[in-house]
Amino acid sequence: MKLSTNFVKDYVDIDVDVKTLAEDMTRVGNEYDEAGKLVNATKLVVGEVKECEMHPDSDHLHICKVDVGNEILNIVCGAPNVRKGLKVIVALDGAELPGGTIKRGVIRGQESNGMLCSMLELGIEHKYVDEADKTGIHEFPADAPVGADAIEYMQMQDDVIDFDLTANRGDLLSILGMAYEIGAIYDKKVRDIDLKYSEIDDDITNSFKVEVNTENCSIFLAKAVKDIQIGESPTFIKNRLIASGIRPINNVVDISNYVMLETGQPLHFYDLDTLKGKIEVRMAKNGEKLITLDNVERTLSDEDIVISDGERAIGLAGVMGGLDTEITENTKNVLIESAIFNGVKVRKTSKAILRSEASSRFEKGLDPNRTYMAMSRACKLLQEYAAGKVLKGMAKYDNENLENREIEISFEKINNVLGMDIPKKDVLDVFRRLAFEVIINGNKIDYTETEEELKNVEKIIVSVPRRRGDISIKEDLIEEVGRIYGVDNIVGRLPEMLLKEGSYDKVYRGIRNKMVDLGLNETLSYILVNDKEAKYFTKDDTELVSLLDPMTEERNTLRHSILPSLLKIYEYNKARNNKDVSIFEIGKTFYKKDEEYGEKNKLAVLATGEFYLGVGAKKQVDFYILKGITEEIMDYLGYAGRYSIVIKENQMPEELHPGQSALISVNNDIIGIIGRIHPLLAKEAVYVMEIDLDKLLDKKVGKMKYKEISRFPSVKKDLAVVVDKKVLSADVATLIKKAGGSSLTKIELFDVYTGKGIEENKKSIAYSLTFEKMDRTLTDDEINEILNKIIEILEKKIGAELRK
Amino acid sequence: MEEQISKIKRVAIEEASKATSAKELDEVKVKYLGKKGELTAILRGMGSLSPEERPVIGSKVNEAREQIERLIKEREEEFAKQELERKLQEEKIDITLPSTKVKRGSKHPLNRIIEEVEDLFVSMGYDVVTGPELETDEYCFERLNLPKGHPARDMQDSFYITSEYLLRTQTSAVQARTMMANTEKTPIRVICPGKTYRRDDDATHSHQFSQVEGLVVDKNISLADLKGTLEVFVRKLLGENLQLRFRPSYFPFTEPSYEVDVSCFKCGGKGCNLCKQTGWIEVLGSGIVHPNVLKMGGYDPEIYSGFAFGTGLDRIAMFKYGITDIRLLYQNDVRFLNQFDRLDR
């Protein structure tokens, strides 16, 4: 809402400058974006072009001699409409305009001592200016006084504040509402609005009926004004509309907007002669058609409120009028509509068609007293500025309650909620300044009560005018006291509550810390990806979740896996030549199954380039580094011995390299994937891992417990066997473990060798085996016996040979 | 015989004293004290002596042996020491060569802030709770006193999935969930950090961002409790001695509602480009829980009251670490991420 301070000063005195007013309004909850002059320019005077000749060295510049009252200035001007005898705006040497400072100078060899201006150069927006201003300079009427201050002459010495209002304060979408707010801040009284006009003897109710056939219209007033003369609005109306952000059109249209600005009540004017003696408000029929005044045919639904003439729709209530009944240059007789429509319905209709100054006011709620007030005000202004004759009587439907809302509240409650100790008199004073009535023991008070007299008063009734639609419960009144009295003096304290330890998810924190310990960088990526990538890296049987109205096609679907997001991050880094990327993320993924939506928490890792393995050691990332990270996190979470890295045909996501990928299984339940990204998706060697944390953490883990250690030394033996190349090392280890029995406590693979000395299709695998007994040191003989048993079984089961 | 002993002793001591290396010394040791050494030879020849002479000569030999042994031991230690010195000298390294690095990983700055906030509130007895990001209209809006068609819904342009499901626009959605989940209707003290989504994307807005929400419900909770709590919060996160200003505002789920400004931590309130010359920076939205919200959550507003607050963590992270473009938080350039690897003291 743009507030013209000239406009609001009609109703309340303001003694402070515009910046102070804006800041003080902010302190009571009304933020602003900008505050300043309507025309932010200096040293502008009215001038008369005395001579005007073409510039000798230019095809469009003119050299003018301009009378500015006390002297004749030589000014070079490029406007096509500059001509001898024209009254113009002259920016003198040193004038400050929004675009910069005007300085005396020489233009193509000709002296120029100022600038002739268009309204655009004064900072007035394009949509408000005349045609002349759009292509050339502003043209004053012939009687403009030469030498006068141009801004004063145009009556544009106004200050404007552009407020960013909260959604509950619909009352501030009116000059009167602003006046009450400013009055409350500075303790000033709001002046009455002038509603006086005379009526002719004709009675509109004899020839016109209003019928409301929907609950979505609570009040509808109609009055007629005859014999209006359409023309230009007076300057002050035009300027106030411009300052308020509305384009002036003609006196009649301008008056409907002016009254809306003053009272907050949107009005609609019909050409009375196009109507058929009746207005009916009803819900539209599905498929009903209406050509709105922007000349577009609209197809309506039963969610739209329409105005009809009894036969057909002639307007969309609160949103836009119909083309057939609109005010034109030839309109003589006007029917004024002042009504309140259901805000939710207006909002819905306007969202589909046009959000306007009017529709936003309906959405935020209106005061039915103002519905009457606006009607009278419009009649008055049409009589005064459009020579209209107001008919007697009013066709109306009124199902509104005009009464104030009475709310009971105790002083104690106010202080309890605010945590303050405000004297009773000061509480009452807030309501006085807001122009609310207060009732104590059934009597309206006159605010002269002393604190002593109020000593035994616990409860009061506050009578809130309908204009403050935002106030309906005690808490709203408490907010008003806080706003106007101020809460700067509240002394902060901590709530007195039971002492207890707070809690947070230590497992997630632990996982994050562990991943950081491993040298990985944590990322935070977008959950929205495109519908193709959303499925990547899963063999999920669930459906994707997609947005109804995405901002871009690149982000239209919620991811099934975190990995597509990490892949994007990898690509971003690659493009910046960051070759070593080792990242992880804990986040959500989304799915739809059997018409139900769900989320899964996942942990994902992506690594490529060089990876740091502890102190100093670097290695190119490969499958086994990812496997190591996986094992590290699984062991850390207590799943040691319960998981395995397995391959299951037809269950591997297609985005992974078929020869370098596997599934992570815990107790035979698949909880994750690991592998290299398929070369078709990433040319370089990029490895990933992802674990479904919800599924994993569901598997219970016991408390950490000490396990007895042997008091006797262990013995280490190396064992190298030659096996077929296809044999998996894990299978060899399993056989060794089985054969080794309980004394074999550790099996570590330390070498895999193929090449010289080993047959083709064979490989040598070497293990370091640790033997240990709880009750004694094992003898060489005992160990050799076990080793022989292991070798025997390996020979028998997989044809292994001891490597010599 | 005695003379012979003292001569051996004298010569042996002289030789031991003159020895210039551990090896020479060892040779002396063998020559006199070894199995075939000169003193040993005398002991062996004692059989030919009279029983009276034997103890006398025996003790002389032992005395000489002890003296020689003592000297040799002293000299051995001397050589060992010299050897150690030499070895230490030899092992001297260039300590100015580059170190062998241990790479640390890093936590994302937004999660660092979240952990800091969690630790602070957990220390004050708050529970950290979470809720779905794919939320229902009911919890995101309706139970927060924002019925369908409410004009304030425009404050948050949402990503809808269906007419009932959407990506949550605010962590406030968790308020209602927390109240509903507390079937005993005992006092509540929670914070909820998490991701939120709105249809908005420019240099200062990201369609995905993070918030933290706080909710306290008990008997006699007032605006003063809110102010005290937020003072602790803001000062811990952004700096000691900062001042708070409560500016009335409007949120459908609190009444009264306040936006909280903090005195500018860059200029101290004098006015600068960060605070747009006002001396204040808006950091939080807050207020006293609206009675309708309490009611819908199963708490009687005549008995219970509460406060709630929420703040955007992206902006806090940007302030705290001096990040000027919000997009850096989501691009995840490793050169950016690597900077958040230290203990922030």
Image (cartoon, grey):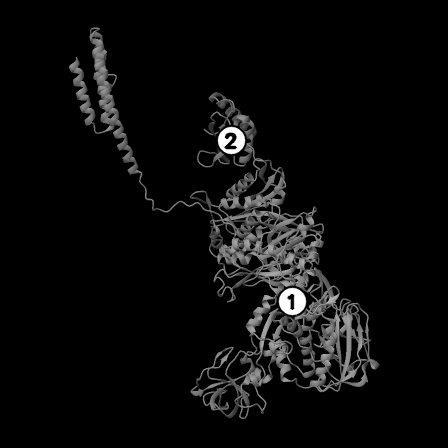
Q: Is residue A195 above or below residue A734?
A: below
- Chain under callout 1: A
The answer to whether residue B31 is seen in the rendering is yes
Both labels 2 and 1 in a single chain: yes
Under circle 1, the secondary element is helix
- Front residue of A8 and A394: A8
Question: Residue farthest to the front?
Answer: A452
Q: Is residue B287 above or below residue B121?
A: below
Q: Residue A473 is drawn in which quadrant?
A: bottom right
Q: Amino acid at mark 1?
A: Asp
Please tell me which of labels 2 and 1 falls first in the chain: 1
Report how many numbered discs are placed on residues in the image.
Answer: 2
In the figure, is residue B50 to the left or right of A602?
left
In the figure, is residue A673 to the left or right of B9?
right
Q: Where's residue B200, x and y in %? A: 60, 62
Q: Residue at x 42, y 46 (%)?
A: B101
Distance from label 2 to label 1 (Cα)? Answer: 84 Å
In the figure, is residue B143 to the left or right of A17?
right
Quadrant of the drawing holding the C terminus of chain A: top left
Q: Where's residue A415, x and y in %? A: 64, 58
Q: Residue B201 is drawn in which quadrant?
A: bottom right
What label sits on residue B120 in the rendered view? none
Q: Amino acid at mark 2?
A: Lys
Q: Where's residue A135, x and y in %? A: 56, 83
**Label 2 belongs to which residue?**
A746
The answer to whether residue A480 is seen in the rendering is no
Q: Is residue B140 above or below residue A736?
A: below
**Label 1 belongs to which residue?**
A429
- Front residue of B300 and A602: B300
